[in-house]
Amino acid sequence: MNEENGESKKILLVESVFGIRSTLEERFRRKKGWEVRAAGSGKEALEACASFEPDLIVLDRELCDMDGKDALYFMMSVQSPLIVLLSSKTDEADEVICLGMGVDAYLEKPVSERIVEAECMALFRRMDKTRLGYGKRAIRRGELYIDPSGREVEVGERKVNLTKTEFDILLSLAKRPGEALKREEIASMIQSSDAFQSLRFIDTHIKEIRKKIRPAAIRTVRGVGYALEKEKAERKGK
């Protein structure tokens, strides 16, 4: 996944509008270390997703043959790639719903290909930084167990499936248990430019994390942000 070790980053570009798709595809193919595959419909995208196994998907919200949310739901159920959603909708509720489904970046059309490329680069940097920078030691907080190297989370004996963004946010909080982190600080730690544009990005993902682990594990600090409860925090294997 890291260009420095010779591994390519696989991107699936799903866009119904030919002009947008061809422009983005041409730009992405010029990027060293990026392997690109393009699809013009939901059907093509689902087939490509299964065979290509992309690390990141740029997905058109308004596909020609299906609702982009339906395609998103299928993709997230099969694997957990990074998702950049391109949408012509200006409905705030739709953005919140899509972020809750696991979208890592929600960009409103019209948007320049430079911005889309920059968002993809930022997400890849965040992923590489998370994998290389957080270390391999697992963290345990009561029943909550987080393995940074394997990117796995357990609550007691139950495995919890988190999206990449949800995992990065939880790990950021776990690195500084008990300490209240501002939303902007969390966004900076996970290298997400989208979070700076909308604080709902962090709030929505925190809400989903709470549903999947335990609501009381993450405390809302009014006027500041969020904190992972510190009591009984310990590192596994210490």
Image: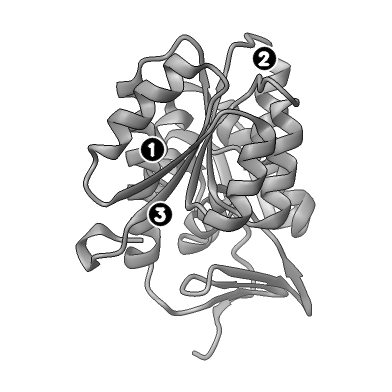
Q: Quadrant of the N terminus?
A: bottom left
Reading the image, the residue beneath label 1 is 120
- The Cα atoms of the two marked residues, 1 and 3, are separated by 11 Å
Depth order, front residue of 6/213: 6
Location of residue 220 with respect to 163 vertically, above or below? above
Q: Position of residue 101 (x, y in %)?
A: 70, 39
From the viewer's perspective, is residue 104 above or below residue 167? Answer: above
> What separation in Å lies between label 3 and label 2 (alpha carbons)?
27 Å
Q: Which residue is mark 2?
A: 92
Residue type of the residue flagged with mark 3: Met
Q: Residue at x 32, y 40 (%)?
A: 121
Dot 1 amino acid type: Cys
Mark with earlier residue (1, 2): 2
Q: Is residue 57 left or right of residue 75?
A: left
Residue assigned mark 3: 127
Q: Residues within 10 Å of mark 1 (few under 14, many from 20)?
A: many
- The first of marks 1 and 3 along the sequence is 1
- Decide: is 172 above or below 100: below
Q: Position of residue 85 (x, y in %)?
A: 56, 29
- Kindly state the secondary structure of the residue where label 1 is placed: helix
Q: Is residue 19 above or below residue 179?
A: above
